[in-house]
Image: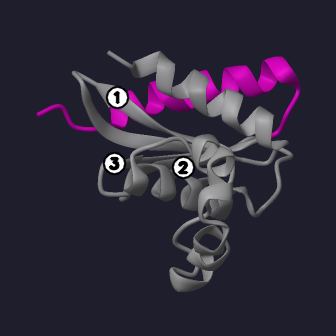
Amino acid sequence: MIEMTQELAQEALQAAFSKADEIGAKMGVTIVDEAGRLVLSARADGSGFYTFDTSFAKAVTSAAYKKSTMDMVNGRGINPHFFDALPSVIPGGVLPTAGAVPIVRGGNIIGAIGIGGGLPEQDDECAKAGAAAIAG
């Protein structure tokens, strides 16, 4: 089984930061393994102090549900009460808002990358760039 490594996490982090620089956004980036355990987290100079928390919670959510948080946002209408209640059921543990995607290698989800600090579309774009950099 392929596992999330520090080296892979560094590559994803750098790709996400590169995309953030390209679009002019200050972001926090967190990579977790398939079980939602922290592998790596960093924030750009000038990004909000809260980006550690939001990027981590988004990454955990993506890893737990094995889907992008943007897909969760887009499907929110199916069960809006679930999404409204989820952060209070697992306080500080999940954040079902745009900005995280699973990381897939060898056909398996090995983790997720979460981004915080930008607009929802910016966070999603940077997460996708980070995940794509190490997909395989």
Tag 3: amino acid? Asp
> In x, y percent, where is residue 92?
58, 76
Find residue 41 and name its label.
2
Asked whether residue 38 is in view, the answer is: no
Q: At 46% across and 31% down in the image, what residue appears?
A: 10
On the image, the x and y values in percent for residue 33 come to 33, 48
Q: Position of 21 compared to 28: left or right?
A: right
Q: CA distance from mark 3 to mark 2?
A: 12 Å
The dot on residue 104 is 1
The residue singled out by tag 3 in the image is: 33
Q: Which range of residues does the magenta coloring cover?
A: 1-26
Q: Secondary structure at mark 3?
A: strand
* Residue 123 image position (x, y, % from top left): 72, 38
Q: Earlier in the sequence, mark 1 or mark 3?
A: 3
Q: Is residue 92 left or right of residue 23?
A: left
Q: Amino acid at mark 2?
A: Ser
- Viewport quadrant of the N terminus: top left
